[in-house]
Image (cartoon, rainbow, N blue to C red):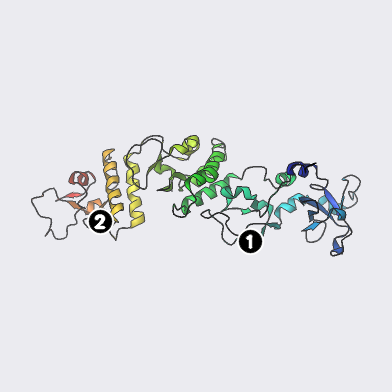
Amino acid sequence: SGAPPAESVAVSDPFVGHRVSISGLIARPDLNGKVGLVVDAYGESRYTVYVDSVDTPETIALRPVNLRVLNPKADAPASDPASASRRPAYEELRQVQWLPVLAAAPIEGLPWRPHSPCVASPDNTRPASDVWLVSFCAHLLDGEVSSSFVLELFGWDKPPRPALLCAQLAEVGSTYSAEVGPDEAVLLEHCIGPIYEQLQQIVGAPEFSGVKAALSRRATIWTGPERGLLPPSQVSFDDDASLCRYLAVAPPSLSPFRTLLVALGVRESSFSADDFLKANTCFVRDYGSSAPLPEAALQECVLNLRLASARGLSPETSPVFLPDADGILRPSPELTFNDAPWMPSAGQAGTRFVHGSVEPELAERLWAASL
């Protein structure tokens, strides 16, 4: 007959999950008579045993012939007070650094924590199957686990904590590059989509306040390969304008996660004039105010200003930045537009003019001075 499935082997295994006494060791006679916890099986010939009845707990691979399952009632040393006061073995096992973990990123383009060690504690480790969800903020097990006992013991039978998912998503947002990857379909299917799905389940719960605090100002909303991820306030589910690089419409693939994304701050309606003016400051942040804008950025900046003006500016709006004649961004009150075309702008000493692509009407609405 064929071998039973791995899961049924793990569940019915006579050693995994049991405390055992050790005997018959030749290479390590110091462990004979000691007690430990069997945490996993390697095929039919070896077991990983966490030996906790020694001054320095350790893990060791042992053969079944060297193990005897203890009867909790018959074999417990009732007269040993140290035994009663010792912290349960599985708690110690979760905190000791003994698990082999991956030292390098298994997938190009995924965030990876620097200086990864070769071993880590179970509390700081997740199964390799969670690589897309926690590669930046948790260690990944170098190997597979088939034992349901081990999965439950280390908490691997449950999804990663929201804090880990938030850290992963924020790091993806800050490091994503269409040139490096991963591919959009792969990223959505294995990383961004599953993270959104898990976080959406706690919208409205007390712990969601921490999620919102962690993500609402970070680039965490997928908008497509061109713009990557943007902060929630720079994404809308409903806008038909030709937007600049700092504002985007949520792609249809994000519709299943609308509840989560709106809770994080994604717009349900069209962008306002204030949204476009905030995008205007992003051009200053990224390109500065001492060098000309690249041509593509200049065109986007002017388009963004036109959209801001078209959606209604309030008198309380702070001055915005306009490109001057050289394409350098400056506060609009420092610039002048030529509303008297019969007067040549040349020879106006000390006057800084707005860029030629900015119409006089637009410049006036954005508080530039009239010639």
Q: Quadrant of the N terminus?
A: top right
Q: Which residue is mark 1?
A: 117
Query: Which of disc 2 and disc 1 is earlier in sequence?
Result: 1
Of the pair 318 and 306, the residue shown nearer to us = 306
Q: Which mark is residue 327?
A: 2
Three-letter residue code for mark 2:
Gly
Of the pair 19 and 256, the residue shown nearer to us = 256
Q: Secondary structure at mark 2?
A: loop
Please say whether residue 315 is visible from this viewpoint: no
Residue 315 drawn at (x, y percent): 26, 41
What's the residue at 24%, 51% (across, down)?
332
> Going by the image, does 160 lie left or right of 146?
left
Of the pair 350 and 184, the residue shown nearer to us = 184
> Going by the image, does 369 lie left or right of 72?
left
> Going by the image, does 128 lie left or right of 209?
right
Question: Badge 2: few (under 14), some or many (20 or more) residues near its Cα, within 10 Å?
Answer: many
Residue 234 drawn at (x, y percent): 40, 43
Of the pair 73 and 122, the residue shown nearer to us = 122
Residue 5 drawn at (x, y percent): 74, 42
Three-letter residue code for mark 1:
Pro
What's the residue at 89%, 57% (across, down)?
23
Residue 100 versus residue 197 in the image, above or below? below
> Going by the image, does 220 lie left or right of 300?
right
Residue 235 versus residue 139 in the image, above or below? above
Residue 297 drawn at (x, y percent): 31, 52
Question: Badge 1: few (under 14), some or many (20 or more) residues near its Cα, within 10 Å?
Answer: few
Numbered disc total: 2
Which residue occupies the extreme left position in the image? 342
Q: CA distance from mark 1 to mark 2?
A: 49 Å
Residue 31 versus residue 268 in the image, above or below? below
